[in-house]
Amino acid sequence: MTEPIPALPCWLNGELSNVRDAKVSVLDRGFIFGDGIYEVVPAYEGRPFRFEEHMARLDRSLGELRIANPMDRAGWRRVVDQLIAAYAQYVGKKPEETNQLVYLQVTRGVAMRDHVMPPDLAPTVFGMVNRLYIYTAEERAQGVACVTADDFRWKKAHIKTTSLAGAVLSRQISADEGANETVMFRDGFLSEAAASNVWVVKDGVVLGPPKDHWCWKASATA
């Protein structure tokens, strides 16, 4: 049985509420087409990690989909700070006593269903927050089970788009095998994982996939 949705704090089009009560139109292009982007900002001990880098990647993703950024950096920072404070209050702690994941999403907005991008729509802006699990030293030393698969996603995987059917299918491959993650390859070369970045340590050097259109471009956490 699916667990009930907790009343976690969220921010939708200027209003702070919770994920149970927040509502968007069924004609939102994010719902109809997956026509939107997302970004995730981790907050360690209540402090956003590499906020500017995450905002730069959000800008790039929006630009690729030709969606105007609905807020400046200061506006996004206010949203992130509000969500961090709201989550800390939700769990009965001070912000600095928490580690959080702040999820931000922008869709093109609401319009009648048509594949062509309608001009001058008001973007739908959504944010939510949840606990960030920090793996213990023992867990990191032990590692996790992974499986490999061909990277069958589209050729613009560097856009953090909400159209994540490919990632969902990839992640399910490992779930079906009782593993934690699916590591994906294109033409014999490592690209990334279904739901996480992949880095390889060889001879003391950290190696990652090239920063191109095959994977999350210029990772904000790398």
Image (tube, helix red, strand yellow):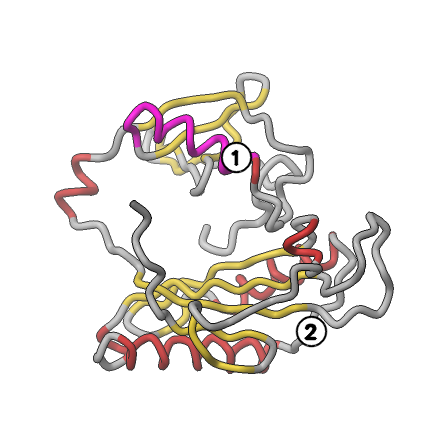
The verdict on residue 173 being magenta is yes
Q: Which mark is residue 209?
A: 1
For residue 218, above or below residue 93:
above
10 left or right of 143 in image:
right
**Residue nearest the observer in this picture, 163 or 220:** 163
Give the farthest residue toward the left.
138
For the point 51% across and 78% down, the residue is 79
The verdict on residue 81 being magenta is no
Quadrant in the picture for the N terminus:
top left
Q: Give the secondary structure at mark 2.
A: loop
**Residue nearest the observer in this picture, 81 or 48:** 81
For the point 17% across and 42% down, the residue is 139
Neighbor class of circle 1 (other Cα within 10 Å; few <14, some 14-19, many 20+) is some
Label 2 amino acid? Pro
Q: Which mark is residue 70?
A: 2
For the point 33% across and 75% down, the residue is 87
138 left or right of 123 in image:
left
Q: Position of residue 91 (x, y in %)?
A: 24, 74
Mark nearest the camera among 2 and 1 is 2
For the point 71% across and 59% down, the residue is 27
Give the farthest residue toward the top.
188
Range shown magenta: 166-179
